[in-house]
Amino acid sequence: MVNDARILLIEPQKAAREALFKTLESLGYDVVVATDREEAADQVDAFEPDVVLSAHTLMDVDLGTYLREVAEVPAAVVVIFPRSTKNPAQRAEELGADGGFCRPVSRDAFTLVLRLAETIAVARQDAGALRRHNDELGERLERLGDVRPGQRFYHYEFFKHLLLVEIRRAKRYKYPLSVCLVELDPYRLPPGQLSARRDIRAGVARAVSESIRDVDIPVYVGGERILIVLPHTPEEGAKKVARRVVRLIGEGYYPVGDDVQDITASVGVSGLDQTRRLSFAQLIREAQKALKSAQQEGGNAIVAST
């Protein structure tokens, strides 16, 4: 028997973990295991489980909050309690889970619980798709009040949630997505001209805006860094965008007092596709490493992670 559902098993005890894993595999499930909260968080992001099956010692309100609010996982969560636990369903609800049962459990009861959990997960995914559609419409309106004047740029903290959702969608529906992390190369302003930095950043923002499509997402990430998210774009396409960004920034006109400042930028490029299922954090880390390599080459350069 083969089941399509993906199950994340969180169990610190080796003997219990091996027994549960063997049972789940025999039932035809695709299973990954985690032994602590940190490993569980990584597996949630990488594996995108339909059902999370967790020992009660590792399932707490913090982990439940992570699953629901941070990772945006529609998975059903089932908690395994010790034999002495009274009212496991109520205890599971207190932990933010969808259900729970006590050890030991028969194979038939185990199968029934997992099937119910799968049903919850599917219903939650369907409801989530509709909710995301409505949320995105609302977010489009919110962005109108959250952009920088005269530029189609967004604040990172405001936009981080949608970036997570966009990356998760790309992984689930198997379409490519890339990011370009842009940073200005070091430059020195004359004394008394520090206010010109704001005008330089505005000119850079115009250059970036002219380099991307309407569906691309430019996000300020602090300092003189801009993150560009490119949905439906493989890494090769992102490198073309990066070359355009570097060229237009370099061609920009940046007056500083009676002089003109030369400005260049470096770009790190990273992408995910069907062969590279990266998490949001991994995608950004790769772009950061690529950017650092570009800067170490002397700047005014583009480096891709692959």
Image (tube, helix red, strand yellow):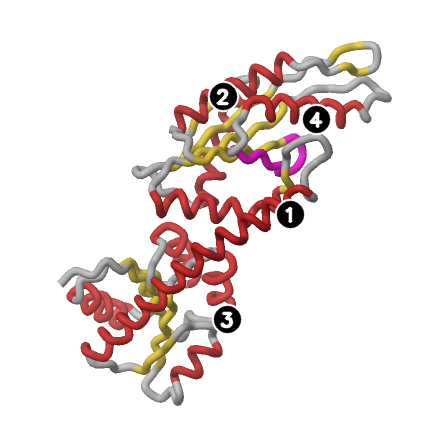
Task: Give the number of the disc on residue 61.
Answer: 3
The residues colored magenta run 216-224
Q: CA distance from mark 4 to mark 1?
A: 24 Å
**Quarter assignment of residue 8:** bottom left
Task: Give the number of the disc on residue 142.
Answer: 1
Amino acid on which the number 2 mark rests in the picture: Ile
Q: CA distance from mark 4 to mark 2?
A: 20 Å
- Is residue 119 depicted above or below 145 in this figure? below
Amino acid on which the number 3 mark rests in the picture: Val
**Closer to the camera: disc 4 or disc 3?**
4
Identify which residue is drawn at 40% across, 28% down: 235
Q: CA distance from mark 3 to mark 2?
A: 43 Å
Q: CA distance from mark 1 to mark 3?
A: 30 Å
Question: What residue is shown with label 2?
Answer: 302
For the N terminus, which image quadrant?
A: bottom left
Q: Position of residue 135 (x, y in %)?
A: 54, 53
- Give yes or no for residue 219 being in the magenta stretch: yes
Of labels 2 and 1, earlier in sequence is 1
Q: Position of residue 6 (x, y in %)?
A: 28, 59
- Do the CB atoms of the residues marked 4 and 3 lie less than 8 Å apart? no
Would you say 198 lies left or right of 175 here?
right
**Closer to the camera: disc 1 or disc 3?**
1
Of labels 4 and 2, earlier in sequence is 4
User: Tag 2's secondary structure?
Assistant: strand
